[in-house]
Amino acid sequence: PATSSGPARSGAVPDATHLDESSTKFKMGKCFAALREWRFALAELETIPARARTLPVTLALAEAYKRTGYDRASVACYKECLRINPFAVEAVEALADAGAAPAEPDATEKSGGEGDDARDALATETLRRLTRGRLALAS
């Protein structure tokens, strides 16, 4: 029922004031990228503050840098992706294509237990092999 302050909200449609600005900028950047408007995508993605850049945002930014010819910035973003998630295969592949080797995963990071150690060691070795293979193909 409607009240004197306006119609009742069903909760099905989110209030526009709750949209996160960084999320909106990311979506706009992705739209520009889908249209192959790389400079517009880059301009939009660069306005997202560094502390708000998630893995998908950083990957999109790296791709926009690459497509606009900013190779060093692209490599730096892909390396940042690997800092966020050392198993980001897309970043490993892009670095290999650019001829840049990713940094080794940090061995000082703590894990949850013995099972995690074995799984992490296998994943790290798999990533190293993938990286070596991609670098060999790129050269």
Image (tube, rainbow, N blue to C red):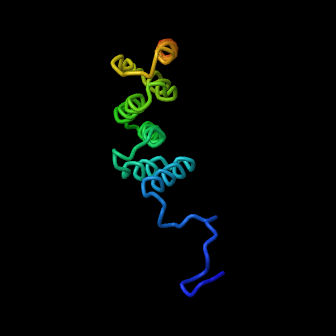
Hey, which quadrant is residue 2 in on the image?
Answer: bottom right
Q: How many marks?
A: 0
Name which residue lies at 40% across and 44% down.
53
- Note whether residue 24 is visible: yes
Name which residue lies at 38% across and 29% down.
83
Q: x and y percent of residue 133 in the render?
A: 51, 13
Q: x and y percent of residue 121 in the render?
A: 47, 13
Instruction: Judge whether 99 appears above or below 27 on screen.
Output: above
Q: x and y percent of residue 58 in the render?
A: 43, 39
- Note whether residue 138 is visible: no
The answer to which of 110 and 29 lies nearer the viewer is 110
The answer to which of 117 and 122 lies nearer the viewer is 117
Hey, which quadrant is residue 76 in on the image?
Answer: top left
* Residue most extreme to the right: 1
Instruction: Judge whether 27 appears above or below 90 on screen.
Output: below
Name which residue lies at 49% across and 18% down.
116
* Residue most extreme to the front: 113
Q: x and y percent of residue 126 in the render?
A: 52, 14
Instruction: Judge whether 21 appears above or below 54 on screen.
Output: below
Quarter that holds the N terminus: bottom right
The answer to which of 114 and 50 lies nearer the viewer is 114
Name which residue lies at 41% across and 28% down.
82
